[in-house]
Image (spheres, rainbow, N blue to C red):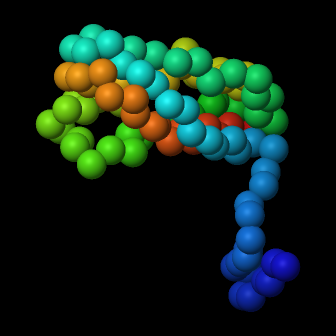
Amino acid sequence: MAEVRNHDLRISGRLKAGNIAMGQVKITPVANAPTSVAVSGLNLKGAGQVIGLCTTQTSVPGKAVHEASVSAVTHTGMTVWIFRTDTVPTELGWLMFRKRV
């Protein structure tokens, strides 16, 4: 149940909006090479720019995992990338949002 106090909206529970999507993907990387997976099937509402973000869920950032990034960001999906020095399957959390115009 939402509660409004002094123009500040507080939400308890899950936030859901047509211009926001988030999730997780698992990538089994190629050692010492950029490896990608597609996030697809979305339809973010709005008409503005789409922002895509990702982060690795690992206990060895900077040692085995050197980079996590996104490319080809559109309102229907994006590509999530990882560069890792070994082939350990890695979970990446991702977030996309579209500015409302």
Q: In the current view of this chain or complex, which residue is farthest to the right?
A: 1
Quadrant position of the C terminus in the picture:
top right
**Side of 10 where 72 appears, left or right:** left
For residue 46, above or below residue 39: below
Name the residue rendered at 20%, 22% in the picture.
Answer: 85
Quadrant position of the N terminus in the picture:
bottom right
**Side of 23 where 80 appears, left or right:** left
- Which of the 4 quarters of the picture holds residue 75? top right
Name the residue rendered at 57%, 39% in the picture.
Answer: 24
Residue 27 appears at what percent x and percent y?
45, 25
Name the residue rendered at 25%, 32% in the picture.
Answer: 65
Q: In the current view of this chain or complex, which residue is farthest to the left?
A: 63
- Which of the 4 quarters of the picture holds residue 50? top right
Residue 8 appears at what percent x and percent y?
70, 79
Name the residue rendered at 32%, 44% in the picture.
Answer: 58
Residue 62 appears at what percent x and percent y?
18, 38
For residue 40, above or below residue 94: above
Q: In the current view of this chain or complex, which residue is farthest to the front?
A: 88
On the question of residue 36 being in view, the answer is: yes
For residue 29, above or below residue 19: above
- Which of the 4 quarters of the picture holds residue 89? top left
On the question of residue 83 being in view, the answer is: no
Number of callouts in the render?
0
Residue 52 appears at what percent x and percent y?
54, 33
